[in-house]
Amino acid sequence: MTRSTPQKKLERIREIWPMLRKLTGPCRACGRACEVDRPGGVQGLCRAMSSAGKEVRWLSAHLHFGEEEMLVGRGGSGTVFFSHCTLSCVFCQNWNISQQGQGTDHSWEELAEVFLRLQDEGAENINLVTPTQYIYPIVQALERALQEGLDRPIVYNTNCYDNAELIALLDDVVDIWLPDFKYMCADYGQKLSAVANYPTVAKEALRAMYDQGAAVRMEHGVAQKGLIIRHLVLPGGHAGSIEFLNWLQREEMMDMSLSIMSQYHPQYQAHRYPEIDKTITAGEFNAAVDCAEKLGFKAVIAQRML
């Protein structure tokens, strides 16, 4: 399956506008479903809010070379780091952005200009990092940028706490789904990220992403379309890594790319939780990688131990 052309994306955006408006005001874009009137300028549980002319906040927008190789290519990933987050992870390495909301408010028109600038600078893709709380102005910006010549794969870089209805709406708008599946246990989702229903919501979101075409299609060494699931191994098995991999196999979700990450270090408020106030061991990480390979996943990306 090839990625959507700019014209196909534009047609899809025009088709989904009524449904997207209903999904974001009252807002049900993420698993919290706090139902605030986001287009009306009301702050949600994610702490993001918008007002006329200042609909979206981000900290930085630049070429990023620290993503998976298939996203970086030669030009780098055109990454926009949006402020705030639908989760409240106590160990977040970008807590200044996600929890404190560092960044500057902009209009959706300015965001469209950023997308085009990143393309002009040689970006291999447009990488939307933690976008769900701003999905309405993001789609507005994409529509404008597509009209003005944007033609790069769109990457949806998310914590996976997304309403499956939103994922379905974005079919043919998003080319590459990049979810970071965090927990198999709802108790850890509540304790470490302040959401009670993380596994239920995230599993439904993953299924919706998978249904849009999982196997990653490459051109010139760069991903163009497909699903890349990230999973961060946590100390003491608190992410449920082995259980997660077995669940994927039972669901017959085996042909996407699976990026197993070793980069966990206790940051932000992790010192308050003894069970995660430590780095992972090589044994914990290798157990997850070995499990993925034994289960028969077709494309495993194992991050080097830091």
Image: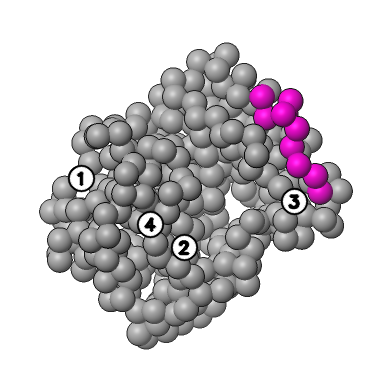
Question: Of the numbered discs in the image, which one, if any, rests on residue 81?
Answer: 2
Question: Of the numbered discs in the image, which one, if any, rests on residue 63?
Answer: 4
State how far apart marks 3 and 1 are (Cα): 40 Å
**Image marks 3 and 1: residues in contact by CB distance under 8 Å:** no
Question: Of the numbered discs in the image, which one, if any, rests on residue 266?
Answer: 3
Type of amino acid at the residue the image marks with label 2: Phe
Q: Which residue is mark 1?
A: 4
> In terms of secondary structure, where does tag 1 sit?
loop
Query: Image quarter for residue 271?
Result: bottom right
Query: Which is more N-terminal, label 2 or label 1?
Result: 1
Q: Is residue 280 left or right of residue 129?
A: right
Type of amino acid at the residue the image marks with label 4: Leu
**Image marks 4 and 1: residues in contact by CB distance under 8 Å:** no
**What is the magenta range?**
277-286
Query: Image quarter for residue 68?
Result: top left
Q: Is residue 229 left or right of residue 120?
A: right
State how far apart marks 2 and 3 are (Cα): 21 Å
Type of amino acid at the residue the image marks with label 3: Pro
